[in-house]
Image: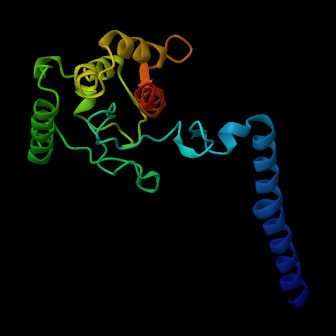
Amino acid sequence: MKSIVMGSLRLGLVLMALCGVLYNAAVTGIAGAILPKQAEGSLIYDTKGRIVGSELIGQNFTDPQWFHGRISSIEYNGAGSGTPNYSPSNPDLLARVQQSIQDWRTNNPEVPVDRLPLDLITNSGSGLDPQISPAGAKAQIPRIRSLTGIPAEQLEKLVEEFTLPRQLGIFGEPGVHVLKLNLALQKLVQQ
């Protein structure tokens, strides 16, 4: 009986060392060597070298002079990825969308609601999306132009510069990374 217990204990310790320590260290080391930026979280730095965000997680921009991203029910908290999946008939969804439309009218009086892209008033599946549609970014240009004084043509070029194509040319939709766009806009504002 003693030999069975001791053998099981040794096997358990060996497997814990292999699976719990060595495997994780090997995978982390390989990932860091092959894809260092991704292994570190795809971090985005400002011009002073400070971390300002990640390419993978959106941020909540509320100041009207900046481009705004998608609505996030979880405030872009990566620990709580997900969003309430309300049906179209759910009164909570209707109330939230109506509030988003009212906020749009208040903050963007130059752009009629019928030109409001849906991605600016709806959640993504994860609640973390860092991108909006090019139409969503362009719809915000009149507000940003009036608050920053930057010509609309220059803002349109900025949106086009930060528009990402479909992945591999066929998957998904084109998108604009809001944080990267706002960092470029910040440089223009400071000039």
On screen, residue 160 versus residue 6, left or right, reads: left
Which residue reaches farthest bottom? 2
- At horizontal 79% and vertical 68% (from top left) the residue drawn is 16
Residue 174 to residue 144: above or below:
above
Residue 2 locus on image (x, y percent): 88, 90
On screen, residue 104 versus residue 28, left or right, reads: left
- At horizontal 73% and vertical 35% (from top left) the residue drawn is 35
Residue 44 locus on image (x, y percent): 57, 38
Q: Quadrant of residue 160?
A: top left
Task: Out of 21 and 60, give the one closest to the viewer.
Answer: 60
Name the image colouring.
rainbow
On screen, residue 64 versus residue 3, left or right, reads: left
Quarter of the image with the N terminus is: bottom right
Q: Quadrant of residue 154?
A: top left
Task: Out of 63 and 77, give the one closest to the viewer.
Answer: 63
Q: Quadrant of residue 49?
A: top right
Residue 48 visible in this rendered orientation of the protein: yes
Residue 18 locus on image (x, y percent): 83, 61
Residue 95 to residue 166: above or below:
below
- At horizontal 83% and vertical 84% (from top left) the residue drawn is 5
Residue 138 locus on image (x, y percent): 30, 17
Residue 164 visible in this rendered orientation of the protein: no
- At horizontal 47% and vertical 19% (from top left) the residue drawn is 162
